Image (tube, rainbow, N blue to C red):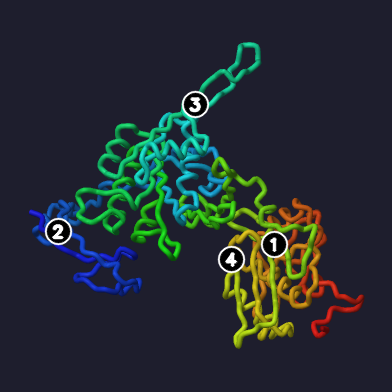
Amino acid sequence: MAKSKQIYVCNECGAEYSQWFGLCKECNEFGTISEEPIEISSSGGYSRSGWQSGTRNNSRASGVAQPRVSLKFSQINNDVQERFPSGYGEFDRVLGGGVVPGSLVLIGGDPGIGKSTLLLQVANKLSYSLPRILYVSAEESGQQVKLRASRLDVSDTKTKAVSNGKGNHNGNGKKENNLYVMPETDLEEILRELESLKPQVAVIDSIQTLHFAALASSPGSVAQVRECTSALMQVGKRENITLLIVGHVTKEGAIAGPRVLEHLVDTVLYFEGDRYASHRLLRSVKNRFGATHEIGIFEMAERGLVEVDNPSELFLGNRDEASPGTSIVVACEGTRPLVVEIQALVSPTSYTSPRRSTTGIDYNRLQQILAVLEKRVGVPLSKLDAYVASVGGLGVGEPAADLGVAIAIVASFRDRVVDPRTVLIGEVGLGGQVRLVSQMELRLKEAAKLGFKKAIVPKGQSLPDDIGLEIIPISKVIDAIIAAIPSERSGDFSLDEE
């Protein structure tokens, strides 16, 4: 007979303790440890048949080793499940080319960023091409979901063209919407509905609000999130149902609940963006079926989220009105090149220690670039405030943007204007050298497509033929400064002139 035992689990990181503590030793959070009951077997050990009962297959006794359930690669079925489109190209890009049948996709993001809006629109698109789509709303009633759907122009039917037999089409045909809505928080009811309806795609909004009655803990606790996700995964894999699961995030921006939640699912997506800005970024951080760090870009409009056809223009400023302290870089997010404008402002400080502030740029990279400019180039920045930002707030974390950041800082210091038709690509080393970067051909083609005329790149970089750009190879940061920042006089560029 099973016995009950009490353990203490941290609701933030999932660490387990034999007694209660006010401070979790793993994540250093106060007041996050709560008591949870567990069941153990009466023998105090594993209850799996064959492990302790002595009924294991003794291959040494029989003299012949035989597999029980394991297979060789040659015995595994080669049938490949084809992906199906979601109706949104940006969403398919982040997933790796489309929705994989039977996969689990976890989508996290700040409150109000548009997670439910995105998934309701995706479910609506899929409902016209697939027989059954289930939307489980654990946070809203059916009336609330319908009210939000009407705002997003989600209807029961849509008009489709119908042929009249003469090659002409009219709009009299109606195509049914196969979207089913289920406002429910009870996990067992949801599992029964999944097994009964057998939808091709099911949206769970959200995993932190589901409740498993067999557990005494409250919804959102470590045990509830872990068990609910595990049960959904088993049904989804068995019935070949694609599950799109919404997850809440903590104040640090990570998915709330135990880390095992991210390990259970196949894909983890983060929906990012400033709620006061119009654009939203869907970023992949884990994907078993595609590349990570891919991004999809949407814009929040009156009727919901709209795909951005040319994202590079979103992160470019007004190139007709060039201002001092700006430069253009080409960043790569996964396999997507994005042309981004970098803005810098350098001004005298009124404090003992100068201020350093970044938006979209890594703070430590800025500190490193400032040190290189002062030590290797001779730009006196130790007593000046420095502010660096990327247009649109796009997070540019790769080293290929270092050269653009350095040029923008020097241009602001000298109050000069960099040619707005020039892009800068390169990593800045601690010795003042400019290092090679990856995916250079992809970056240059994106710049040429947007009408740029000149590119300053590291010397020794392999370049494609007939790219349509004037290529300026450089090996030192000082060479890039001379090439990118014009002098007021016709002579050479001088850092000492005031």
- Taking the image as shown, residue 199 lies to the left or right of residue 337, namely left
Q: Which numbered dot is residue 106?
A: none
Quarter of the figure with residue 403: bottom right
Q: Nearer the viewer, mark 1 or mark 3?
A: 3
Q: Regarding mark 1 in the picture, which secondary structure is present there?
A: strand
Nearest to N terminus: mark 1 or mark 3: 3
Q: Amino acid at mark 2?
A: Ile
Q: Earlier in the sequence, mark 3 or mark 2?
A: 2
Task: Give the residue drawn at x 74%, y 85%.
Answer: 378
Q: Residues within 10 Å of mark 2 (few under 14, many from 20)?
A: some
Residue density around tag 4, few if under 14, some if 14–19, many if 20 or more, within 10 Å = some
Which residue does the numbered mark 1 point to in the structure image?
341
Most extreme residue toward the bottom, as rendered? 352
Q: Earlier in the sequence, mark 1 or mark 2?
A: 2
Q: How far is the residue under mark 4 from the one under mark 1?
A: 14 Å
Residue 236 location in percent, x, y? Answer: 35, 42
